[in-house]
Each structure stands twice: as C-alpha cells, then as structure tokens.
Image (spheres, rainbow, N blue to C red):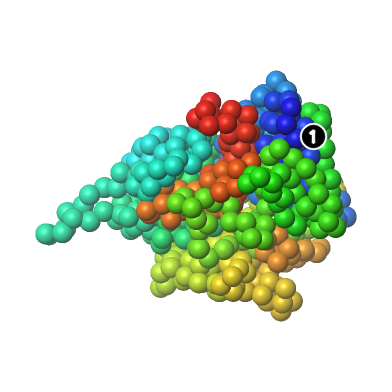
Amino acid sequence: MARIVVIGAGMGAMAAAARLAVAGHRVTVYERAETYGGGVGRFERDGFVFDTGPGLLHLPAVYRDLFVKTGKEPLESLVGLEQVDPASRHLFADGTTVTLPNASRAGVGAALDTALGAGTGERWADFMGRARDAWDRSRRPLLEEPLRPDWQVLGRDPYPAVRQRRLLRVRQAATLAGVGTLELRDARLAALLEWYALGYGLDPRRAPAGAALLAYLEQTFGSWYVRGGLRELARAVYERCLARKVEFVFGAEVSRVAEKDGRAAGVELAGGTVAEADHVVDGTGPDGLPGRPPYREGEVAPRPDPRTGRFTVLLALRGARPPGTPHRTVVHSAGGAGSAEAAEPEAGAVFGGGTAAHPTVTVLRPDDPATRPDEAHEAVTLTATVAAPGPAGGPDWTDPALRERYAELLVGAAGAAVDGLGERLLWREVRTPAETGPVPAPALAGAGGRFLRPANTTRLPGLYAVGGWAHPGGGLAHAGMSGALVAGLIVEGADFRGSR
C-alpha cells in the first residue's frame, strides 16, 4: 500500500483519489479552499440555487465508469440524471430560430431544414459524418491513453476536410471557422458550429478543424442535467471518496512538492509541515506549483494561448417557468448571421484580451424544483465566454463598473429568450473569472500539437498532473478521464496503456 498525496479537490483530482483508494492505497487530499469540487460550484440565496460552473454534463459514461469501478453502483442510483430535450434552442441575429432535439441526428437535420431552409440539414449531416471520422480517429490516443512519447503524431488534424477546387486552386478548411465558411456555407450554421468551440474557450479562427468533434460529441451522446444542479455530481464523487477512506484536509495550501533522491516524496504545506508520500498527484491550476513546470523536456509544454473563463449572471425571477420552456437557449452574437458585421468581432475581443460588444449568451432555465423556492419563481443562469486575466493581461473583472456594464449586456441579450425579464427580476448575482478563475479548454489533435495539454507524468518521478490543465484537457468529462489515466499510471506503472 502506497501513501499518495493529492493536491486539490477538483473533479479530476477526486476521480483519481477514488480510483487509487479502491486499488488499496492510502490517499490524502489537501485542498486550499474550504470545500470540494473545484470549478463545479454552487450559489444559494432566498431558496434559489444556481450552478456557478458548468450547467450540463456531456459524455456521462465517464462518470458511470468511475462509480462502477469504485463501488459497482450505477451513477443514476446516486444522482438524478436526465437527458435534456430539446438539447437547445438557437436565436440568430437575423431573427431565425431553430430548436434542436437531443441526440437525434435525423431530428437535427429536419429541424435545420425547417427553420433555416432546405439543404441546411443535409450540409450539417454531411459535416457531422466527417466530425464522426475525426472522433473515431482521435478518441483513443487523445482521450483514453496517456500522452504518447511521440505526441507529435497528434499534430495531424483528424478531420477529413473537403477538398474544393476553385479555378486552379484547391482549398480545404484548416480551422473550425474555415469549416463553417467552406463546408457549411451558411452564416447561421457557422455560428452554431463556432458556438460549440467558444463555449469550451476555443477560438474558432485558430482551433483546428478537428474541433468539430466537440459538436459531434454533444449531438451524438446527448446533453444531461443532474437534478439539483451539477454540484450534486461533485457531491456524489466526494462522498464516493469518503466511502473509500480517502482523507480530505480543507483550508490546507500546498507550497511545494518535497523531493528526495530525485523523486517526489510528499508535499510541504504553507505552515511548513511536510506530509510524506510515495506519489504526489497535482491538480492545481494553469501555472502549477512555483518552480515546477508540469511537463518533461521534449514533451508538449503548457499552451500559451489567451485564457478564457465564464461571465455568469444568476437571476432570481418572480413568476413560474412557462411550460415547454427549453432548458437551454443560445442567443447568438449580434455580430453574427444576418448582421452587417462579421462573427469575428466576438472572438477577436475575447481572445484578444478585451470584452465583446455583442457576446453570445447561453440561457439555462432548468425545470427543477430544487433550484427555486416554489413554483411561483424561477432560477435562470446566463453565461458568456470572456477573456480571463493571465500573464498577458486581460479585463479587470474586479472593477464594479465593468462587471455591471457586462451584466447589463448579458441581461439585455437574454431578454430575447425570457419574456418580461425586466419586470420579473427580483435580484441578480454576478460571477466572473475574478472569482471562478480561468477555464481550461479540452485537448485537440491537429495544429501541430498546439492544442494538446501537458502529460500526466512529469519531469519529476512520482509526481503526476491531473485535471483540466493536464492531458486530456478541460471539461467535466475530460477531467474524469484524467483521473482515470493518473490512477492507471500509478497502479500499473509503465505497463499502463490506457483506460478500457
């Protein structure tokens, strides 16, 4: 039985801790905050309950596997998991609206044809077929295996872009934005595609065409809601850890990783106490611990891309949620389809470290009694992807005037999705990257490896990196995968070839 210290109680870190404890190891988690879950937070006031992190779950199979492997219990026996149908409603700037069913490729095509015009559904279906190819080609090496020593092979884009001959030139999409322009050939379809990337903190103008698999994942495996909010999933993972005798120490900040004989030997806490360990699992943020880059020489380094996060407005509304209201509505940027501007200004602002004048706003309206004081009220969450402060600068989200101005932008856009929003508003709360931090994007194949994440092994033997800032990147499902990979590397060592 090995002694294992885990730094941080985020979702990936807890997933690793539970799996390691089941394997017979003694696991202690040190978390500097006073609670678990990392970015999967919750805000409660006056009987209203809101998620302050992700609001929907994709690829629930990752967490089903976690609970089966750590206790032989189905996920659905521990949380109320339900598919969201319709998956989303989209309001485009030219006034058109489309409502997309959940996990139905034929249904999505029919909805697009009806709402956006004949032929749009077929073009989208053809695109999804190519996105499926990208998924099939990259799924295992990108998500289910440790980062390969020859990770450069993942620099090739797995998306089979259509070769188009124009006069004497052959063109094909190299980026996600290029797929929208060259293959979808409809500004609204392009806006729909780019929304999937933007929601993950990816710049569609620079993300490789292989990012198309993000849209494929959601439309194929569906969108899922956890009753009571995604915080309930974090609670279930935490309680699974406790049931497997994982020890948690909250309010404990780790200052450095202790070394002995050229390998990790534990951690030193801020007060000077040293906790000895045979292995250390680091789930800290994008910069890691001081003086310890989470990668080995010759392997992929941390991405220098601009950091993004979520600007979130939590709305407490009087009045019941109307029957038939979609769980999720997306109000696309006014600089998108049907306007005189190109869609680029939003991405240009976000990834240029500024603020978008017309942000794309996602409106979440769960039909969940646990989120509201009674049936005469409704809890609504608005989110937009924004620049997060980093080494290169970024907006000062602690500025009250900026927070208020941007909150007004989101509320104004959400008025297109929520009737009578202004008259119904009781109060609102704002959360920005100043409180919730930057959000890591998922790893992607293509672009020469620029969108990969650092390996789970590090240059220091016995030290492992877990969570969204390590392989295979950000997102709830990806964090769970990183936990499985780290546990496999520790339990099986060099023989580990990936999750099964």
Task: Please state the total of marks drawn on the protein image.
Answer: 1
Residue 283 in the image, given as x and y percentages of width and height = 67, 48
Q: Is residue 464 visible?
A: no
Q: Which residue is situated farthest in the front direction here?
A: 261
Does dot 1 land on a helix, a strand or a loop? loop
Q: Is residue 328 above or below residue 66?
A: below
Residue found at x 57% / y 47%: 458
The residue that disc 1 covers is 246
- Could you tell whether 475 is left or right of 204 in the image? right
In depth, the one of 45 and 482 nearer the eye is 482
Above or below, 348 relative to 197: below
Q: Name above or below for residue 295 compared with residue 203.
A: above
Q: Position of residue 161 (x, y in %)?
A: 29, 47
Residue at the extreme left of the image, as rendered: 168
Q: Which sits in the foreground, 145 or 59?
A: 145
Q: Residue at x 52, y 50 (%)?
A: 296
**Is residue 174 visible to us here?**
yes
Choose top left, top right, bottom left or bottom right for residue 457. Answer: top right
Left or right: where does residue 410 sit relative to residue 147?
Answer: right
Image coordinates for residue 190, horizontal then vertical, percent: 40, 56
* Quarter of the rendering occupied by the N terminus: top right
